[in-house]
Image: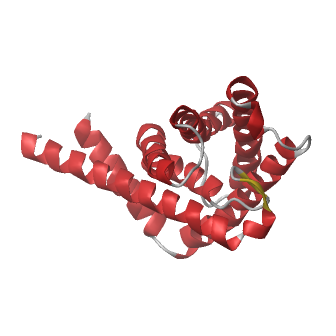
């Protein structure tokens, strides 16, 4: 493989990561407008659609590149959030990392890859991710900023919001995966670009 091909593959991956990040940030902002009446805090809503994008980024772009896409989107949101820079960074690391960790643990528990067209796989992943994400965020807030803990039931509210967002997204992804070749095309192109990088 030539250096030019490797450079082109690298640029392609960076573009996918940037696109994933911009979509994630835009969806977060749109979610706060669409479901403002369902928000408990700036970080907790009863419907949180970006929770699905965190999973989708990892499922389509791979663990590393998908996590970087979510992290880039989280960094774009630093200008939107009212928290300290340090708390924003920690929240972003958890948001990006918990999706990758959920996928890794689900693969390990099932002893196979996840099937994007299999609703049971997507539902189990959505539930597992929602629990993992809410728990890790609340551990962070308990350690770094207890002002984020405003309601004794907010852990459950966050799980519900992440789960609702992930389920809506999972159902949409399953439909898209069944009726179009978009998912296969994106996965193939990102895997090819990633292989060329290696």
Q: Residue 98 appears at what percent x and percent y?
A: 62, 37
Q: Is residue 31 left or right of residue 139?
A: left
Residue at the spot 50% in from the left edge and 64% down from the top edge: 26
**Which of these two is toward me, 100 or 157?**
157
Taking 74 as reference, is 108 left or right? right
Residue 133 locus on image (x, y percent):
70, 40
Q: Is residue 127 something that shows in the picture?
A: yes
Placement of 148 over or under 17, stated as above or below:
above
Q: Residue at x 43, y 59 (%)?
A: 22
In-image side of 141 versus 2 (left or right): right
Which image quarter is the C terminus in? top left
Please identify the quarter of the rendering in which residue 144 is found: top right
User: Front-most of 114 and 133?
Assistant: 133
User: Residue 102 location in percent, x, y?
Assistant: 65, 38
Residue occupying the far top of the picture: 143
- Residue 155 higher or lower than 105, as above or below: below
Q: How many marks?
A: 0
Does 41 sit left or right of 31 as displayed?
right
- Quadrant containing the N terminus in the rendered view: top left
Residue 2 in sight: no
Q: Please tell me which residue lies in front, 121 or 129.
A: 129
Image position, residue 152 (x, y; %): 91, 40
Residue under the image location 50 percent in, 52 percent down:
77
In the displayed image of the protein, which residue is found farthest to the bottom?
A: 179
């Amino acid at each position: 493989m030539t250096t030019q091909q490797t450079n082109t593959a690298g640029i392609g991956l960076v573009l996918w990561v940037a696109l994933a990040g911009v979509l994630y940030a835009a969806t977060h902002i749109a979610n706060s407008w669409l479901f403002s009446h369902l928000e408990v805090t700036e970080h907790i809503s009863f419907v949180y659609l970006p929770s699905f994008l965190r999973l989708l980024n990892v499922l389509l772009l791979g663990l590393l590149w998908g996590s970087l896409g979510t992290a880039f989107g989280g960094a774009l949101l630093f200008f939107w959030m009212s928290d300290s820079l340090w708390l924003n960074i920690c929240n972003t690391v958890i948001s990006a990392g918990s999706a990758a960790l959920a996928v890794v643990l689900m693969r390990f528990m099932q002893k196979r890859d996840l099937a994007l067209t299999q609703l049971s796989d997507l539902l189990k992943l959505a539930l597992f991710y929602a629990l993992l994400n809410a728990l890790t965020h609340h551990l962070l807030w308990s350690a770094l900023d207890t002002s984020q803990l405003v309601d004794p039931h907010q852990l459950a509210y966050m799980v519900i919001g992440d789960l609702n967002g992930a389920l809506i997204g999972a159902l949409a992804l399953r439909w898209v995966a069944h009726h179009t070749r978009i998912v296969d095309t994106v996965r193939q192109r990102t895997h090819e670009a990633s292989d060329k990088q290696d």
